Image: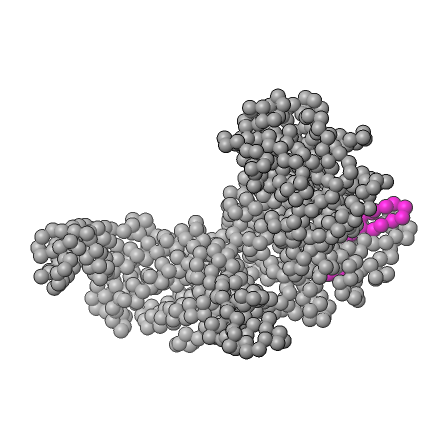
């Protein structure tokens, strides 16, 4: 056995021990309390860096801690292998996605294991394997059978780089969330899930998720976007048609000066057919549809529109107002028609100003407004004016009264609207589960029978993005027979978005080897809901909302016994790095301030004398990203310091829910600490075996022994509470390090086995108890070195089978004494400190007392005497 701390050898040996003895194997149906600890599974599309490692390390800490608390822990891992991340990685490397995924999994699994992060690998899943996506297709069919899956032509968010449609949730500020390309609008036949049917239960059941971050619940609430308002029918002038419009501000109806339709509004072409404006309006509609969501609806977006030549009638006052088509109106909310009230809606105000449309004030604040004096819309509450029978009524009250008025006159009704839109799940890409649908010329759309699943993804396919699914070119895949009537038919060629694969994977872990059912009902009800889910906040809307929807559908179908999949959620912060950014192009130039290379935006630009006219580089904290070139490989860190040092620094860097800055020099101190811990344990290795253990009686302890024994119990309490209640791993580690520093300061004989005095034997007992406690408390954080030191302390191997230490509240409670503080023999203050407190700390606190400072200011302090637990005496002249 090594006598010096050699992380490589120690970590390799204990990782082999954990796997060979199946320390992380979960027992189905065990009579111990269960704990399902799940870390979001990764896309296998490359290699991992220390930013990725944070959530795996956190999950491993929680799993190890719960095992030591006696729980039957399920901690599985798998691979979210279908979808754009894996396919794009395959395209970049020029190899088939299946081979690209295999290589990435091999690399990432090695990296995860090198961290000492362990899972029940017998339950490993891969969403791109037929044995898995067979059941993803089954989930699709369950939604189809429930009337929740449908196909229609629809304008979709189109990524020109990924060459596929995107769900609304995959578009961030008008750009593709995967490749950052500007998103366009395109009309395509698409498959959707009717998640809107579940808008209310998804919103209402957020109240059940008390152990989710408030931030995430608020994000889902805002995305669902429940609005109570009124659906108002505006008659189309010269026609029997009406244009329905949803509004949350019926109190402003008398201020409507025009109406706007979205370019995608289904009746626009009919409205202008045969009119002089037809070609001009249709041309504008075509141009607006090509604009991205950000170009149309962002705060800085230019408001553009065109008059249709038609008018609508305001149902409350009979006024005829012009009907426009405007780019800032979208079909994603309400009906796609907006009653424009420029005085009380900022977007309408900007549009009216741009096109010289009337502005009419119908809600007045205390200070009277006039359209001529307005520089922005007044959107707050006020008093209704110019509003017929409702003049003088507060606007909040007016909303209720006007709604009732509209219902009584049959021109409107109270209604609830949601921002949430149906979930677009079809992709025009190769690497995904085929949609299990057949298109028959006689029977129409026909689902593939369950006994014919999986519909296999063909292997020999040119998967280069081309704007339609690559599967459409594979005749042997497309051509089939109708499952219903047996005639020639064609398979659906779009594939399922990878989000569906990840919306039920947590169920599969309960029984991953069953090939006759997607999951064993008994086992899934035993393990689920997940007790602790861990992952990034970037999944707050997409993955988490979709998973909740799928589980609710399965629950209503009688397939699972719960309606929410995740009981508790933790979202870790990002690891960032201080990088130098070019002020011109905003790319990372370097993360090393000593390297001052020109930015790449100068390369080939013909800029002479660029060394003299250097572009300034601004330091900025940036999220670690391979695309930005500022990642830190944990392979390199482990090679230099070992996995335990990396784990400890990652956990100690700050509260895990906050973003943290990676500093190269910060990790060194934790490596030194582990070396000190190693040396201190090995310094008395023989004594742990030779000295007989004896119970420690607190009442027999005095001085430093008493204080350290109390500190040990207090540290157990703090670390337990920091893990259990607050997840403050950083402060837990700091507390253990403080305890160790106290233990390291204890003066013991070179060999305690021959100690003849009771005091020496007692001190060694306190020392051993404290040191074993340090190792036990640190074991979830730095498991390799703790496993090794545990055996060196004379204990059998296998810390996960050890019980987590318990504290005695009476012992842990700080004993306090009040010390009189004298200056030249006269009482000048009193100081309350812990019994047996460190003399240096007591002296410092005594000199800081206000009464003491008044009588020592400007004088020389000759001596400060601390009589432990009795008095502090200061002599000055």
Residue 500 picture location, percent across and down: 68, 52
Quadrant in the picture for the C terminus: bottom left
The vertical placement of 580 against 131, above or below, is: below
Q: Which residue is nearer to you in this view: 75 or 420?
A: 420
Residue 797 picture location, percent across and down: 45, 66
Residues drawn in magenta: 430-447
Residue 34 picture location, percent across and down: 53, 50
State whether residue 517 appears in this view.
no
Q: Which residue is nearer to you in this view: 348 or 517?
A: 348
- The residue drawn where x is 71% and y is 26% is 318
User: How many labels, in total?
Assistant: 0
Residue 431 in magenta?
yes
- The residue drawn where x is 43% and y is 61% is 652
Is 361 displayed left or right of 140 in the figure?
A: left
Is 133 displayed left or right of 381 in the figure?
A: right
- The residue drawn where x is 27% and y is 73% is 750
């Amino acid at each position: 056995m090594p006598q010096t701390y050699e992380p490589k050898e120690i970590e390799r040996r204990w990782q082999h021990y954990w796997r060979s003895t199946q320390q992380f194997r979960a027992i189905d149906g065990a009579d111990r309390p269960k704990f399902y600890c799940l870390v979001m599974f990764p896309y296998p599309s490359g290699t991992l860096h220390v930013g990725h490692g944070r959530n795996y390390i956190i999950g491993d800490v929680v799993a190890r801690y719960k095992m030591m608390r006696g729980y039957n822990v399920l901690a599985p891992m798998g691979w979210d292998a279908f979808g754009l991340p894996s396919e794009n990685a395959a395209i970049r490397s020029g190899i088939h996605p299946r081979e690209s995924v295999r290589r990435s999994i091999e690399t990432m699994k090695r990296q995860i294991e090198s961290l000492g992060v362990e899972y029940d690998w017998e339950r490993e899943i891969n969403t791109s394997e037929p044995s898995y996506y067979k059941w993803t297709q089954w989930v699709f069919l369950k939604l189809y059978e429930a009337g929740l899956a449908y196909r229609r032509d629809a304008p979709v968010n189109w990524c020109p780089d990924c060459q596929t449609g995107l769900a609304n949730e995959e578009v961030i500020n008008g750009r593709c969330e995967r490749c950052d390309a500007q998103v366009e609008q395109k009309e395509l036949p698409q498959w959707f899930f009717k998640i809107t049917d579940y808008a209310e239960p998804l919103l209402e059941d957020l109240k059940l998720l008390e152990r989710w971050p408030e931030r995430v619940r608020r994000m889902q609430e805002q995305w669902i976007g429940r609005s109570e308002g009124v659906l108002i029918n505006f008659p189309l002038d010269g026609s029997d048609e009406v244009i329905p419009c949803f509004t949350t501000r019926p109190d402003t109806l008398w201020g409507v000066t025009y109406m706007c339709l979205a370019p995608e509004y289904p009746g626009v072409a009919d409205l202008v057919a045969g009119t002089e404006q037809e070609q001009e309006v249709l041309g504008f509609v075509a141009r607006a549809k090509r604009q991205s969501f950000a170009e149309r609806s962002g705060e800085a977006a230019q408001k553009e529109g065109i008059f249709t030549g038609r008018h609508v009638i305001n149902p409350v006052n009979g006024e005829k107002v012009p009907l426009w088509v405007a780019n800032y109106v979208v079909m994603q909310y309400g009906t796609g028609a907006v009653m424009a009230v420029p005085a009380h809606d900022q977007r309408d105000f900007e549009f009216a100003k741009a096109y010289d449309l009337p502005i009419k004030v119908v809600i007045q604040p205390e200070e009277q407004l006039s359209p001529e004096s307005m520089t922005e819309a007044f959107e707050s509450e006020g008093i209704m004016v110019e509003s017929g029978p409702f003049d003088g009524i507060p606007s909040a009250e007016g909303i209720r009264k006007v709604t009732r008025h509209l219902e009584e006159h049959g021109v409107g009704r109270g209604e609830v609207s949601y921002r949430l839109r149906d979930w677009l799940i079809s992709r025009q890409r190769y690497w995904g589960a085929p949609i299990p649908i057949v298109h028959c010329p006689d029977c129409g759309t026909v689902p593939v029978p369950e006994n014919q699943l999986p519909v296999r993804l063909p292997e020999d396919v040119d998967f280069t993005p081309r704007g339609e699914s690559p599967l459409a070119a594979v005749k042997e895949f497309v051509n089939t027979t109708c499952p219903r009537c047996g005639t020639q038919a064609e398979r659906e060629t779009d594939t399922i978005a990878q989000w569906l694969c990840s919306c039920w994977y947590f169920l599969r872990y309960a029984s991953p080897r069953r090939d006759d059912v997607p999951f064993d009902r008994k086992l899934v009800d035993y393990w689920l809901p997940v007790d602790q889910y861990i992952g990034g906040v970037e999944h707050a809307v997409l993955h988490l909302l979709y998973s909740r929807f799928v589980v609710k559908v399965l629950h209503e179908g009688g397939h699972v016994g719960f309606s929410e999949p995740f009981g508790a959620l933790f979202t870790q912060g990002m690891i960032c790095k201080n990088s130098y950014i070019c002020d011109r192009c905003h790319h990372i130039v370097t993360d090393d301030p000593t390297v001052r290379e020109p930015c790449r935006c100068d390369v080939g630009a013909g800029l002479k004398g660029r060394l003299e006219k250097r572009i300034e580089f601004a330091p900025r904290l940036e999220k670690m990203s391979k695309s930005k070139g500022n990642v830190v490989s944990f392979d390199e860190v482990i090679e230099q310091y070992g996995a335990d040092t990396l784990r400890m620094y990652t956990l100690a860097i700050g509260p895990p829910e906050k973003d943290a800055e990676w500093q190269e020099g910060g990790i060194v101190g934790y490596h030194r600490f582990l070396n000190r811990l190693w040396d201190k344990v090995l310094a008395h290795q023989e004594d742990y075996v030779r000295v007989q253990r004896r119970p420690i009686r607190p009442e027999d302890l005095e001085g430093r022994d008493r204080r350290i024994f109390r500190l040990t119990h207090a540290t157990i309490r703090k670390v337990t509470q920091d893990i259990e209640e607050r997840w403050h791993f950083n402060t837990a580690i700091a507390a253990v390090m403080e305890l160790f520093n106290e233990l390291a300061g204890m003066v013991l004989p070179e060999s305690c086995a021959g100690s003849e005095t009771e005091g020496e034997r007692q001190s060694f007992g306190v020392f051993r108890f404290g040191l074993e406690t340090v190792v036990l408390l640190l074991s979830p954080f730095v498991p390799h070195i703790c496993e090794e030191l545990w055996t060196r302390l004379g204990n059998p191997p296998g810390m996960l089978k050890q019980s987590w230490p318990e504290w005695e509240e009476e012992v842990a409670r700080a004993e306090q004494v009040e010390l009189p503080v004298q200056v030249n023999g006269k009482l000048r203050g009193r100081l309350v400190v812990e019994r047996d407190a460190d003399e240096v700390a007591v002296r410092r606190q005594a000199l800081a007392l206000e009464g003491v400072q008044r009588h020592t200011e400007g004088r020389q302090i000759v001596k400060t005497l601390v009589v432990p637990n009795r008095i502090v005496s200061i002599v000055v002249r």
